Image: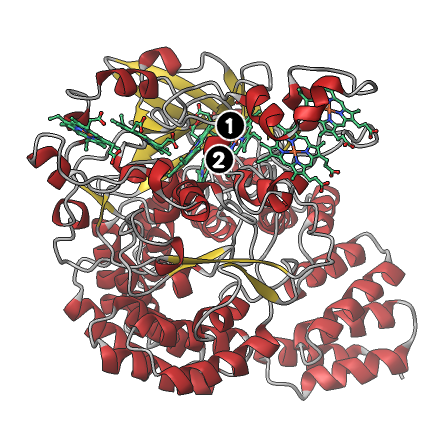
Amino acid sequence: MFFIVVLLALVMTSCSTSDNTPNAQAGYVNPRTCEGCHAGIAASYRETGMAKAFHKIDIEEVPGQTFTHEKSGRTYQFVKREDKVFLRRTEAGGENAIEKEIQYVLGSGNHARSFIHRTPQGRLIEMPVNWYPEDRGKVAMSPGYDRADHMDMRRAIGYQCAFCHNGYANAKGTSLLDDPVFEGDLPEGIDCQRCHGPGREHVAEGGRGKILNPKKLPAARKMEVCMQCHLETTSFSLPNSIVRFDQKIFGYNPVNPLESFVSHFDHAKGGKEEEKFEIAGSAYRLRQSACFRGSKEELTCTTCHNPHQKKANVDAACVSCHKQIAGMEKHPAKADCASCHMPKRRTEDVIHVAVTDHKIRRPDGKLDLMAKREERHEVMGKDSYQGEVVSYYPTTHASDLYPALAQVIHQSNLKKGVPRLEAALAKEQPKEPAFYVHMAQALHASGESAKATGYYQKALGLDEKFLPALRSMGASQLRAGDLAGAAGTLEKTVGLHPGDSLAWLELGRVYRGQKKLAEAARAARKAVELEPELVEAHKLLGVVLEESGDRVGAEAAFRAALAEQPDEAECRGNLANLLLTKGDAAGAEKLLKVAVVSSAAARFNYAVLLAQQKRYDEALEQALGAPRSVGSLELIGNLRMARREFRLAEGAFREGLKLEPGSGRLQVGLGTALGAMNDFSGARRFLTLAAQGTDAGAKAEASELLRTLPH
Ligand code: HEC
Ligand code: HEC
Ligand code: HEC
Ligand code: HEC
Ligand code: HEC
Ligand code: HEC
Ligand code: HEC
């Protein structure tokens, strides 16, 4: 749910133009329709968290505090103007303020409220700060944001969040590979039909028509009505579930078995994930408890909960199975069973929130259930879970397609998963193009890019307009250096999907690679026009305009990018350079000084600027804090030379040469450092290498130095 870091170009995809109103088609009615005849139930349901899970913001809910996040150096403040609410963000020093309107709130506030900005394109953006009642009603960072380089005002709410937190919306996309874009009015809260199924028939016949009453379902199916939203094995990379590709995103009707819609997966048994405790895990934890396992599935959510009511009816439920407790001599209590056996506990994925643990068990005094924790951030395929992904619900599948897909989709088990998915595809020959796109992406991730193309073509053979395949194929051709191929694919893509900002962006990158600067600028402008909040598009436009000599245009584009994303280090650096060439050194310094709070990468740019101004000590301090790269190590080496720290300079140049053994500039640096320490043969060796290299500047410098070197 929260922390999956995915390659934007690979996965962000979108926008079929078809009018997709699955709910009206499938017999759903306006949820208000039910209130007329079921007034009592409707009134008590309105008080529950589920009914309030998504709603238009109410002025009363607007937090008063101003909140400063130290790691990113940004300050957030809620602003009320006329009858609208905005979140205002400023950087350290009060710079770079922007405001976004908050139209919606996600979360009843039982545990949290997330503030949502809806863009003109129909994306829902989660704001970086949440309100948490448990942390004494404080404003704090949203889940996943407690880091210097957080997503600020750019993280889109996916279709999956909306699936669990609301009535069915109108999705513009048709699959989870599509961009999460929502059309028309949004529902406000989880409505009756999410548990009772579409109500048109029932209503049309004045309440005598059919409607699902979960009470009449067998126990396991009764629980599935709740598990569609309350079963999340984990919100970290795995994947915890895959919605079947032959289903619409908001197409689940609870009259059908859950497995006809979605498969759930889990970590392999025996690992450190065994005891995980996360926010949307009530069903997962309940299913682990002795009460559930020992009562042959007769224990369901409705044993204790009436979903139309706020309060659970717990003691009576416990006692109905544990009658002997009443007479148990040693047992400490006869009431309030949950307080000892189902305590609240801090969750691992939303660290400011504690919820009831549904794994009913003997109290364990040793565990500190409320212990504060640091937020965990993972990069998929790097420090995310590595191991087998096992089928959890259902536990077995008729074909291996989805289980095999689960191994690769978050790169948890790539090595074994790739051949397994290839075999399953060959055997089952599914008709949904999404399978083949995932296969191609998995091949990419495991370094077999050449094989990927065939799978993209297979996907396009099934649906030649399939945007996720087109976009993803173009992006991988670009990365593989096949510019002509990428241009062909992406020109076709924007022809078929002219409103797709990300395809235009990718096409702009390709044109830039082909040195067609005017076309590149046009494509970048198109992307900006379609989606003014797309940072990458502004950035590309700035770079291309700068390369075409339009400094004024470039400056405006970089500033627009930085307004959205203050820690975009490359834009900072470029803009600072533009200011320097205009002679505005003070402006450039101000820009970079603020950036280093949240971005280590910006330190390099700042160090260069300081070095240019001969402020060597300050420059060295910044350069040492920047990520190690050939550039930063060369700078450190040169600054050490300026301070006559020759031994340390040598170290920096040598470290740089490990990263890029053929770098002429580093060879010159190292030669100079050795020469300064009277190691003339060493100096000669590296200067000669540079003089024979391909870097013209380094070559000239090295030849010059060789001439002055004593024998
Ligand atoms: C699998 C379904 C599911 C998904 C996906 C999901 N959530 Fe949740 N979320 C839940 C459930 C269930 C709870 C309530 C847990 C509880 O109270 O024990 C919850 C709780 C919350 C709360 C606290 C609400 C309150 O006051 O109790 C917030 C805020 C929230 N989720 C935001 C999000 C966001 C943002 C996303 C997408 C990034 C998301 N959720 C994805 C199921 C889901
Ligand atoms: C979160 C799921 C959920 C939602 C939302 C929900 N219900 Fe129910 N409803 C149930 C379940 C489960 C039962 C069966 C309860 C039981 O087993 O006793 C039920 C039972 C009922 C019944 C039958 C009552 C009975 O005694 O058998 C009616 C009528 C009903 N719901 C109406 C509504 C209306 C109207 C709404 C919207 C205002 C609504 N429900 C919202 C889950 C839900
Ligand atoms: C015109 C009045 C009317 C409307 C509108 C209406 N109902 Fe009913 N509903 C009834 C009547 C009458 C019954 C049967 C009497 C009873 O058991 O209470 C009933 C029964 C039910 C039951 C129990 C069915 C069973 O098999 O046990 C559920 C669940 C239910 N309604 C849900 C809904 C939902 C959800 C909506 C809105 C989509 C809705 N109703 C709209 C009148 C209505
Ligand atoms: C459409 C998704 C969805 C379905 C279906 C669903 N829930 Fe929920 N439920 C949620 C979310 C999301 C929350 C947290 C809402 C919030 O507080 O913002 C929640 C909260 C709750 C709560 C916390 C108390 C409260 O005030 O609401 C209980 C209890 C609960 N659900 C029980 C159930 C039961 C029992 C069922 C099945 C009959 C069920 N839910 C079905 C999504 C769902
Ligand atoms: C549907 C029946 C049912 C309900 C309701 C139920 N339990 Fe249980 N519970 C069981 C069964 C069956 C076992 C397993 C007994 C065994 O294995 O000997 C059990 C085991 C336990 C255990 C021992 C757990 C362990 O790990 O050894 C505790 C404690 C417990 N229940 C407490 C509760 C409490 C508290 C509630 C209410 C919140 C509750 N139960 C509700 C059926 C139930
Ligand atoms: C044995 C009794 C029992 C069963 C069965 C049970 N719950 Fe609960 N549930 C509780 C208790 C106790 C609480 C905390 C007190 C309260 O909210 O009234 C709770 C709270 C919740 C909450 C709110 C969590 C929080 O702390 O805010 C959610 C969500 C929830 N239950 C969902 C479910 C779902 C979904 C199921 C079925 C998978 C389920 N519960 C089954 C007893 C139960
Ligand atoms: C004040 C805390 C507390 C409350 C309240 C409480 N219990 Fe317990 N319960 C315990 C402890 C502690 C044990 C473990 C005793 C042991 O391990 O010998 C226990 C053990 C149990 C067991 C397992 C007994 C066995 O056979 O080994 C069950 C079942 C149980 N409780 C049910 C309940 C029910 C039902 C309620 C509510 C009526 C309840 N408890 C309320 C603390 C509590």
Dot 1 lies on which element? helix
User: Which residue does the image show at 18% across and 57% down from the upper left?
Assistant: 499
Residue at disc 2, CB closer than 8 Å to ligand 6: yes
Dot 2 lies on which element? helix
Q: For residue 304, which numbered disc appears in the image?
A: 1
State whether residue 279 appears in this view. yes
Kind of residue sitting beneath label 2:
Cys
User: Which residue does the image show at 75% across and 86% down from the upper left?
Assistant: 688
| Residue density around tag 2, few if under 14, some if 14–19, many if 20 or more, within 10 Å | many
| Residue density around tag 1, few if under 14, some if 14–19, many if 20 or more, within 10 Å | some
Residue at disc 1, CB closer than 8 Å to ligand 6: yes
Q: Position of residue 397 (x, y in %)?
A: 47, 69
Between residue 354 and residue 533, name the one nearer to us. 354
Q: Is residue 622 above or below residue 428?
A: above
> Does residue 693 appear left or right of residue 533 in this picture?
right
Between residue 485 and residue 198, name the one nearer to us. 198
State whether residue 512 appears in this view. no
Q: CA distance from mark 1 to mark 2?
A: 6 Å
Q: Which residue is mark 2?
A: 301
Between residue 705 and residue 595, name the one nearer to us. 595
Kind of residue sitting beneath label 1:
Cys
Q: Position of residue 245 (x, y in %)?
A: 32, 65
